[in-house]
Image (cartoon, rainbow, N blue to C red):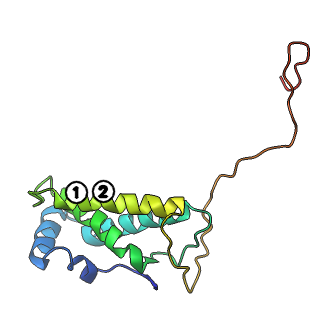
């Protein structure tokens, strides 16, 4: 599967265009950037962060995610975007919140290496920083008479 850039058309597979436009116009302030693309960018960055959390994973070009994580990204986007309208989101059964929670579990599995993602055809120049434990090789022997390393 390919790495893709999620679009507004992908969002419309989850919410109606009327709902999207109603929320967009409700939260759009003068001089503000489009809240749809702004929120989508935040979600994409978050998904890429989970991917980069596993040093075995390779990131694709900036702004892309694996196609198999599109469902997770949209499941996070919808409640996040709808919450911007001050809690007016329609989710009477809590299904959108449940989908979001499942999406985060999937992303945690990606980060833990328990959910495989495809390597991108084109790799990102971005090199995620992953802290590696350091050990200098010196053994420390602590006894009452010998206090090496203190």
Q: Label 2: few (<14), some or many (≥20) within 10 Å?
A: some
The image shows residue 52 at horizontal and vertical percentages of: 55, 64
> Please, what secondary structure does the residue beneath circle 2 have?
helix
Residue plotted at (88% across, 38% down) = 138
Task: Specify whether residue 36 is in view.
Answer: yes
The image shows residue 49 at horizontal and vertical percentages of: 49, 62
Which residue in the rendered view is the most extreme toward the top? Answer: 144
The image shows residue 36 at horizontal and vertical percentages of: 26, 70
Q: Are marks 1 and 2 in contact (CB under 8 Å)?
A: yes
> Which disc number belongs to residue 101?
2
Dot 1 corresponds to which residue? 97
Asked whether 144 or 128 is in front, the reply is: 144
139 with respect to 112 (left or right): right
Residue plotted at (61% across, 75% down) = 125
> Which disc number belongs to residue 119?
none
Q: Quadrant of residue 66 in the image?
A: bottom left
> Please, what secondary structure does the residue beneath circle 1 have?
helix
Q: In the displayed structure, would residue 43 be above or below residue 141? A: below
Q: Quadrant of residue 33 in the image?
A: bottom left
Q: Quadrant of residue 22 in the image?
A: bottom left
114 with respect to 128 (left or right): left
């Amino acid at each position: 599967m390919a790495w893709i850039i999620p679009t507004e058309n992908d969002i419309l597979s989850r919410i109606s265009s009327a709902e999207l436009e109603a929320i967009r116009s409700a939260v759009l302030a003068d001089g503000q950037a489009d809240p749809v693309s702004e929120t989508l960018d935040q979600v994409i960055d978050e998904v890429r962060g989970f991917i980069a959390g596993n040093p075995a994973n390779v990131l694709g070009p900036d702004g892309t995610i694996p196609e198999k994580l599109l469902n997770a990204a949209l499941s996070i986007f919808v409640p996040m975007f709808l919450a911007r309208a001050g809690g007016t989101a329609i989710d009477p059964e809590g299904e959108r919140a449940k989908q979001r929670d499942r999406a985060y579990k999937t992303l945690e599995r990606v980060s833990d290496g328990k959910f495989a993602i495809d390597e991108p055809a084109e790799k990102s120049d971005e090199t995620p920083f992953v802290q590696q434990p350091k050990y200098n090789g010196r053994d420390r022997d602590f006894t009452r008479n010998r206090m090496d390393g203190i």
